[in-house]
Amino acid sequence: FGISWGKSNATLVFSDGVVLVDPEYLKERKVFVNLTCAFRYGREDLDVLGLSFRKVLFNSTVQVFPVPPVCQQNLSQLQEKLVKKLGQHAYPFNFTIPHSLPCSVTLQPGPEDTGKACGVDYELQVFCAMTEDEKIHQRNSVHLLIRKVQYAPEKPGPQPMMETSRNFLMSDRILHLEASLDKELYYHGEPININVHVTNNSTKTVKKIKVSGNSHASFFHSSGASALTCNVSLSRDQVSPSSTLCKIYTLTPVLGPNREKRGLALDGKLKHEDTNLASSTMYELHTDMFIALLCSYLPMVLLMEGAVYCMDVAVELPFVLMHPKPKEEAHTPPTHPGKLPRIRTEIAARRCGL
């Protein structure tokens, strides 16, 4: 038997699909579809003595064959086409994915790491058995990885801008730093322009200006939270006493030069497909959403005097890095204005046989 999997509906967070079965192979067995969302926060090789670093966030199983007598569902356009094309042995199914579940995120493993990477993943399993509690065997099951992706909001937030000043010892003059971004929302692969304005009224010389892009990934589990920072790029300039500097620095957060950095947060990685840096985690305050991995991006502008960092003369500018909405959904009005961006699922792989 095989699986075909479709995108989520435009207004609800659910996905639909079709299972093609061979009655002669099934004999008297039934066909079930299981969807599991799990959060792995430790290496797979450390799962010993009954201790697992994996938490199941969502698990649901439905029977698709024989069709339950009380099961009545409206077929989507995709399901109607597939059932018509595949014939009478094609059976539709759908899952409602809770909005509170996190999006697919993977922490990039190191060269020597083995097993499954840390992060959030979604797996769909179709299997035949007498009951849904029966042990699943590889010879009579099909596995499909999917991912949950969050789109950019309809209306971005205000333009990020930060400023700070520092007084030096035995001097009443200050060093002022102001930095801003063109906008708050950026798409993957889009260059980010950082506007830097330095007013140096002090007697000190700013010998270096470091501009870096930092990716923060905090994952939460039973023992608390931890964070990882990865520098993406840097530049340097000088500002003499009683002078000013106005300059635009450009950073482009991409995965290319960071493929060897262990622990870098990526969008849910799929087999035989490349991925990108993880999208920013969007959530509402006072919500029941489980935030397994909190991803954020903070470009930092740091003024330096020689080899000594002027840590007080530094600003961070948080921005949002996300995927744009597909063209076919760009003109679809939001169901709940002001709520979280729409989420969809994507096909990861297709395995037919047996």
Image (cartoon, rainbow, N blue to C red):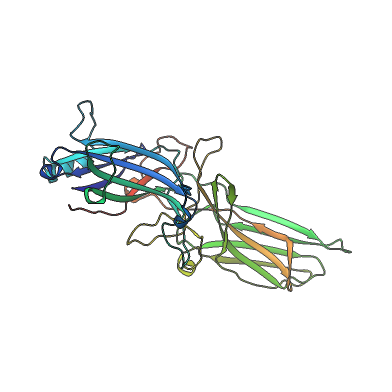
Residue 185, position in %: x, y?
A: 50, 52
Res 177 seen here: no
Residue 134: give x, y in percent of width and height. 28, 39
Residue sitting farthest toward the top: 70
Q: In this view, does 271 lie above or below 208?
A: above
- Relative to 105, is 15 above or below? above
For the point 45% across and 68% down, the residue is 256
- Residue most extreme to the front: 49
Q: Where is residue 7 in the image (x, y as percent from the top left)?
A: 30, 45
The residue at the far right in this view is 170
Residue 11: x and y in percent read 35, 37
279 or 332: nearer the viewer: 279
Q: In this view, does 302 lie to the left or right of 75?
A: right
Residue 120 relative to residue 229: left or right: left
Direction from residue 27 to residue 126 in the image, left or right: right
Residue 64 appearing in the image: yes
Whether residue 48 sits left or right of residue 130 in the image: it is right
Q: Can you tell which quarter of the image residue 195 is in?
A: bottom right
Would you identify the image quadrant in which residue 93 lies? top left
- How many numbered discs sit on the rendered protein? 0
Nearest to the observer: residue 281 or residue 240 = 281
